[in-house]
Every structure is written in structure tokens, then in C-alpha cells.
């Protein structure tokens, strides 16, 4: 029985397939003092060389963002995230900076980490 799907290239998702991507934000931290370091101007060119447009400047000068390409599955997303993180570490090192992931803020006002096994956080409005 012939199929009516147009041909697509190997490695590309089927037309109409759901894709997933991620953005992560990192603080640039001084390798000696452990304090935020406004080194985006020094780190970004190296990050762009290693990760292309997937490395992006943020508003704060001690912050940088990575964005994955759309991925067909979580294994591909994980692999791309790990690769991008490694590139960012390499870009920051010559500038005496380390990168630290900055996580989301809890919406319920609690300072302890979220326990996602307990279900969604209560909605307290916008």
C-alpha cells in the first residue's frame, strides 16, 4: 500500500512531528572569588565561536543563555544540552570564569528546592 507522505531527509523528524527544545541560563562566576563576574563581553565571542547562535547574550552582564535546536526526542535534547554546556565551560575558562546554572524561581514563595514527585506547584496567579 503506497503512503502519501512526502519524502523527508534521514535524521529529520516526520512532517507534523512534535519537537522539543530548551533554553538554559547560566551565571558567569569569577573562578577565584565565586562572585558573579560581568564578563559577557569577553566570554560571548568564544561561546559564539564554539556554539554558534545557540549561545546568546542576556540582559545582565554576568549571564549567558544557551538554546538548543528543536529536537525530535529527549535523548537528542539531552545530548545537545550536554554538548552546549561543555562548549560554554570551554568558552568561560580562558577568562577566569566558571558557569553556574541559574534555575527557575519557585512560584509558591518557598526557598527549598521543588519536589516534583509531589505534583505541580499551586497556582498563586500571575
Image (tube, rainbow, N blue to C red):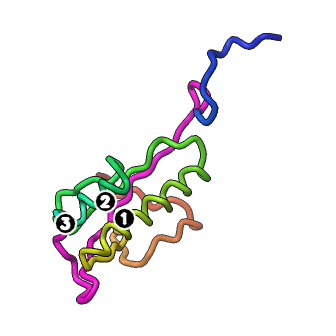
**Quadrant of the frame with the N terminus:** top right
Q: Which residues are magenta?
A: 13-40
Mark 3: which secondary structure? Answer: helix
Measured in 3D between alpha carbons, the distance from the residue under mark 2 to the one under mark 3, in whole angstroms, is 9 Å
Judging depth in this view, the residue of 114 and 22 nearest the camera is 22
Picture quadrant of residue 72: top right
Task: Indicate which disc residue 42 carries.
Answer: 3
Q: Residues within 10 Å of mark 3 (few under 14, many from 20)?
A: some
Residue topped by disc 2: 47
- Residue drawn where x is 24% and y is 60% of the image: 44
Which sits earlier in the primary sequence, circle 3 or circle 1? 3
Q: Are marks 1 and 2 in contact (CB under 8 Å)?
A: yes
In percent of width and height, residue 29 lies at 26, 77
In this picture, is 3 found above or below 21? above
Measured in 3D between alpha carbons, the distance from the residue under mark 1 to the one under mark 2, in whole angstroms, is 6 Å
Q: Is residue 22 magenta?
A: yes
Residue topped by disc 1: 88
In percent of width and height, residue 17 lies at 58, 31
Amino acid at each position: 500500500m503506497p503512503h502519501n507522505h512526502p519524502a523527508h531527509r534521514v535524521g529529520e523528524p516526520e512532517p507534523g512531528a512534535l519537537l522539543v527544545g530548551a533554553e538554559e541560563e547560566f551565571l558567569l562566576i569569577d573562578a577565584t572569588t565565586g562572585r558573579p563576574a560581568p564578563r559577557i563581553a569577553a566570554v560571548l565571542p568564544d561561546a559564539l565561536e564554539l556554539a554558534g547562535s545557540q549561545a546568546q547574550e542576556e540582559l545582565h552582564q554576568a549571564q549567558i543563555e544557551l538554546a538548543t535546536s528543536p529536537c525530535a526526542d529527549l535523548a537528542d535534547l539531552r545530548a545537545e544540552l550536554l554538548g552546549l554546556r561543555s562548549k560554554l565551560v570551554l568558552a568561560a575558562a580562558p577568562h577566569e570564569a566558571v558557569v553556574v546554572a541559574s534555575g527557575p524561581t519557585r512560584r509558591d514563595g518557598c526557598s527549598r528546592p521543588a519536589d516534583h514527585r509531589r505534583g505541580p506547584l499551586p497556582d498563586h496567579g500571575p
